[in-house]
Amino acid sequence: MNESNLIRKIKKGDENAMDILIQSYYPFIYAYVSRKMLMDDCAKDITQEVFFTVFAISSYLSTRREAVALFISDSFQRL
């Protein structure tokens, strides 16, 4: 699925499209957070919260790049 279709579907609340985005970036975000955290459970919780935040404001996203930037900045702020 191309970027514009993915974001458009996420904006419409398509959970499958959000799952694609999560599956694409979960390993990266989790690896980043877990390097900073000493406890694995905390790293998983923070990673989940990051994706929840992105989903909650997904109607404002224009590109996949914006979503990735939000993943990273939200992860950083939570640490």
Image (spheres, rainbow, N blue to C red):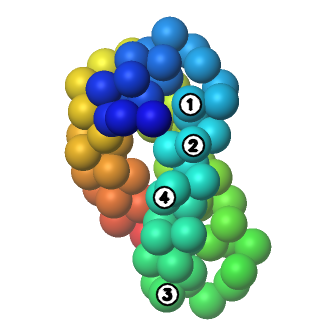
How busy is the neighbourhood of tag 3: few (under 14 within 10 Å), some, or many (20 plus)?
few
Please tell me whether mark 2 or mark 3 is closer to you in this view: 2
Determine whether label 3 and label 4 are within 8 Å by CB: no
Distance, label 3 to label 1, CA atoms, is 28 Å
Distance, label 1 to label 2, CA atoms, is 5 Å
Residue that appears at 75% across and 73% down: 41
Residue that appears at 57% across and 43% down: 20
Residue 69: horizontal and vertical position, in percent? 26, 51
Amino acid under disc 4? Tyr
Residue 1: horizontal and vertical position, in percent? 45, 35
Distance, label 3 to label 4, CA atoms, is 16 Å
Nearer to us in this view, 62 or 20: 20
Tag 2 or tag 4, which sits nearer the N-term? 2
Residue 3: horizontal and vertical position, in percent? 33, 35
Amino acid under disc 2? Ile
Which element is circle 4 on? helix
Q: Which residue position is annotated with label 1?
A: 17
Q: Quadrant of residue 75?
A: bottom left
Q: Which residue position is annotated with label 3?
A: 35
Nearer to us in this view, 19 or 56: 19
Tag 1 or tag 3, which sits nearer the N-term? 1
Q: Which residue position is annotated with label 4?
A: 25
Which label was assigned to residue 20? Answer: 2
How busy is the neighbourhood of tag 2: few (under 14 within 10 Å), some, or many (20 plus)?
some
Which label was assigned to residue 6? Answer: none
How busy is the neighbourhood of tag 4: few (under 14 within 10 Å), some, or many (20 plus)?
some
Above or below residue 46? Residue 52 is above
Distance, label 1 to label 4, CA atoms, is 13 Å
The quadrant of the rendering that contains the C terminus is bottom left
Distance, label 2 to label 3, CA atoms, is 24 Å
